[in-house]
Image: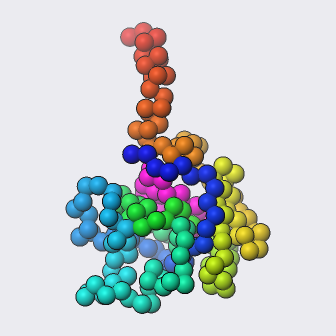
Amino acid sequence: MAYDKFTLLKSTAVPLPIENVDTDQIIPARFLKATTREGFGDNLFRDWRYNPDNSPKKDFVLNDNTYSGKILVGGRNFGSGSSREHAAWAVYDYGFRCVISSFFADIFKGNCLNIGVLPVQVSADFSNKIFAEIDKNPSTEIEVNLQDQTVTLLATGEKESFDINGYKKDNMLNGFDDIDYLMNVKSNIIEFAENTPL
């Protein structure tokens, strides 16, 4: 399933300065029965967002109109716990296109890259600067440049580089998932097969 190309994202951000956010907190296990990616955003951080009677918890950041944007800034060790890909689906379906953290669990990071959510790992120092700027001004914007592999606090001009696997970077720039990539090089595969002796 293809997704939107990711090249340059300039957006306000939603801060979630909580460490060790695991995938069961991102999308509780009781919501994993669906087989398509749609609708998971409604239950992103479900138990943190809603009371047992389904009323919104006013003190949770996703229920606070002060914060909005396509970037989620999480605490260290974001996406730990089980390997459920539904956690990445929930982040994407809610509307986030980038998650910034000082450390990601590897499987969650890979799941995000597979569906068009860019996980940007920055230093702890830069992460603290981002949180401080959002706290000072919730309308502050962050620029994420995938081609240059940089994230910039536009209010201060402070910038930091991030790493990404070259194959995954190319896929995100083109809006490809793994199947899209294979279909894009189908003619090369056929040519190789036809010209390679058994």
The answer to which of 79 and 62 lies nearer the viewer is 62
| Viewer can see residue 197 | yes
Q: Specify the quadrant of the image occupied by residue 24.
A: bottom left
In the picture, the quarter occupied by the C terminus is top left
Return the x and y of residue 140 as percentages of the image width and height. Answer: 66, 76
In-image side of 105 versus 49 (left or right)? right
Q: Which residues are magenta?
A: 101-123
Outermost residue on the right side: it is: 157
Q: Residue furthest bottom?
A: 58
Task: For the N terminus, give its image quadrant.
Answer: top left
**x, y percentage for residue 167?**
54, 41
Return the x and y of residue 31 as percentages of the image width and height. Answer: 26, 68
At horizontal 61% and vertical 60% (from top left) the residue drawn is 9
Q: Nearer the viewer, residue 165 or 169?
A: 169
Query: Is residue 106 shown in magenta?
Result: yes
158 lies left or right of 76: right
- Residue ID at (37%, 68%): 41
> Residue 127 versus residue 140: which sits nearer the camera?
140
What residue is at 26 percent from the left and 87 percent from the top?
A: 52
**Residue located 74% across and 74% down the image:** 155
